[in-house]
Amino acid sequence: MPASNVKDDFLQLPQNLTVRSIAAVQQEILQFIDKNTSATIEIGDDCQADISFIQLMEATRIYAGTAGKHITLAEPADGAVLDALQRGGFLEGMSEEDAKFWLHQGGMQ
């Protein structure tokens, strides 16, 4: 049974987005991006996330960009993901592009 639900260009991630499961999440995201020209990623409200997820998403954004593909988050980061961004220092001095991706700030994503 896959860890996520897939609808066209929409990928819902599993609830565990921590170092213990990040390799499987990475594989799932990469396979999804390889099959789609754009991807909307949904993160559950009650997910568990740590810095490994933030690092994975940053690497995913770079990978997608070099492959001519586009990824977005379905909703702005909140809960555990927002906490991981804060703890990791990502919110300080965030670029406009990063703010659009993570927080949906600065215009349409």
Image (cartoon, grey):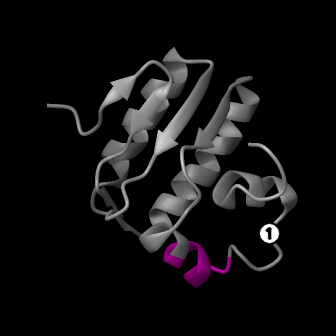
The prevailing secondary structure element of the residues shown in magenta is helix
Residue 13 to residue 50: above or below: above
Q: Position of residue 18 (x, y in %)?
A: 35, 64
Whether residue 64 is in magenta: the answer is: no
Q: Which residue matches tag 1?
A: 94
| Residue located 45% across and 36% down the image | 29
Q: Is residue 82 left or right of residue 13?
A: right
| Residue located 76% across and 59% down the image | 105
Whether residue 85 is in magenta: the answer is: yes
| Residue located 84% across and 63% down the image | 95
Image quarter of the N terminus: top left
Which region of the structure is painted magenta? 83-89
Question: In the image, what residue type sits under mark 1?
Answer: Met
Q: Check disc 1: other Cα within 10 Å, few if <14, some if 14-19, many if 20+.
A: few
Image quarter of the C terminus: top right
Q: Position of residue 107 (x, y in %)?
A: 83, 49
Q: Is residue 61 left or right of residue 16?
A: right
Q: Position of residue 86 (x, y in %)?
A: 60, 80
